[in-house]
Structure formats: C-alpha cells, structure tokens
Image (cartoon, rainbow, N blue to C red):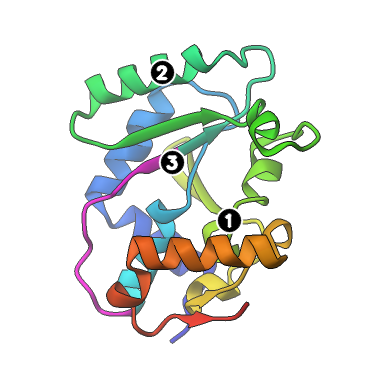
Amino acid sequence: MVMSTQDVVDLIESDPGAMRVLRVTAGLDLPDWWIGAGFIRNRVWDAISDLPPRPDRDVDVAYFNPDKPDPHQDTSAEARARLALPGTPWEIRNQARMHLRNGEAPYPSTLAAMARWPETATCVGVTLQRDAVHLVACHGLDDLVTMVVRPSPTFDNEAGRAKIRHRMTTKGWLNRWPGLRLEI
C-alpha cells in the first residue's frame, strides 16, 4: 500500500514522541516553522519497511524570521527547546539567512528554503497549528512514500548527486532500508 498525505499525518499523530516534539516547537513561538527532513522521512521509511522506530538523530526545525537573522536567536531557541524536552537533538535554523551559507539569493519563506534541501524525500515538513498536524512535501510525496532517493532540483547536478551518495553512505540508509531505490 502506498501511503497518502493523510497516512503520513496519521503516522506522526500516532507517535507520542513526535507529538511532544511538535508541541514543544509550537511553544517556542517561531514564525513560519516546520520540522523536516529525517524527522518525517525516517518515520515513513521505518513504517513502510516494518521496522521499529528509532530515536531521532536530530530534529531539524526550520523557521523564517528576516527581522532577526542573528544566529544567536537559533541558539536561544535551541536552549529553550532543550529545557522543555531534554535529550532531544535539536537543530533550529532561521532560513532567512541560510541563503548566505549556500551562496544563493535570499529565500522568501521556510518552504522555499526547504525545497532546496538535497533529496526530494527529505524536502518534507510538518507543523502544528491549533493542535492539528499539517504536512508539506515541496516536491510531492511520491518519492518519500515509494522510498526513492532522487536529487531535488537544486542538487540535480554532478556535485549534488555526489553529496547525496555520500549522505546515503555516512547515514547508513541502505543498511537501514535496503528497499531504497537510488534514482540519480
């Protein structure tokens, strides 16, 4: 069975640990925030592969606040998140300045920045609004739910594909999910 958007939302909502992380993040009061990447991808691929979930390696919180681009804002948000939920590997980044690190034009929103992450299956995010989980898949949900690793448009070049291969190796994706299909 191929998972739908609602199936992915249901998977997140049925995970008490994921919901704790979402509630803590909502309490940080960050503008235009989403939790993405492995937080969703790994849960979906574990569910499809009938594997028990494993602890999050990191919780990638992306938000957008062009009025406060100082990296100390991220550090402060991470400290507040660690106080609220100790032991969680938080990584909170204001996407309003990430274009500088990437040598690109400024991003207009969190979702525009997320769309530039390496793999299409990683360019996904969830947020919590009025206690409801909302999911976005910047390049569609198909690659995520069919376990395809494909470069996002930003990484669809020789250097980008090499980076994706390196990420797959160092993160042990094929060891964890042998059903992955690499399409680069």
**Helix, strand or loop at mark 3:** strand
Residue shown at 62% from the left, 46% from the top = 114
Depth check: 156 or 80 in front?
A: 156
Depth check: 6 or 44 in front?
A: 44
Q: Which residue is mark 2?
A: 75
Residue shown at 31% from the left, 72% from the top = 47
- How many labels sit on residues? 3
Q: Amino acid at mark 1?
A: Cys
Magenta-span inclusion, residue 42: no
Residue shown at 59% from the left, 80% from the top = 183
Mark 3 touching mark 2, by CB under 8 A?
no
Quadrant housing residue 132: top left
Left or right of residue 53: residue 60: right
Using the numbered discs, state the Cα–Cα distance from disc 2 to disc 1 in whole angstroms.
Answer: 23 Å
Q: Which residue is mark 3?
A: 60
Badge 2: how crowded within 10 Å, few (<14), some, or many (20+)?
some
State whether residue 139 appears in this view: no
Magenta part of the chain: 49-60
Badge 1: how crowded within 10 Å, few (<14), some, or many (20+)?
many
Q: N-terminal of the two: label 1 or label 3?
A: 3
Position of residue 85 relative to residue 135, above or below, is: above
Q: Where, quadrant-wise, is the N terminus in this rendering?
A: bottom left
Quadrant housing residue 33: top right
Q: Amino acid at mark 2?
A: Thr
Q: Which mark is residue 123?
A: 1
State whether residue 65 appears in this view: yes
Q: Nearer the viewer, mark 2 or mark 1?
A: 2
**Helix, strand or loop at mark 1:** loop
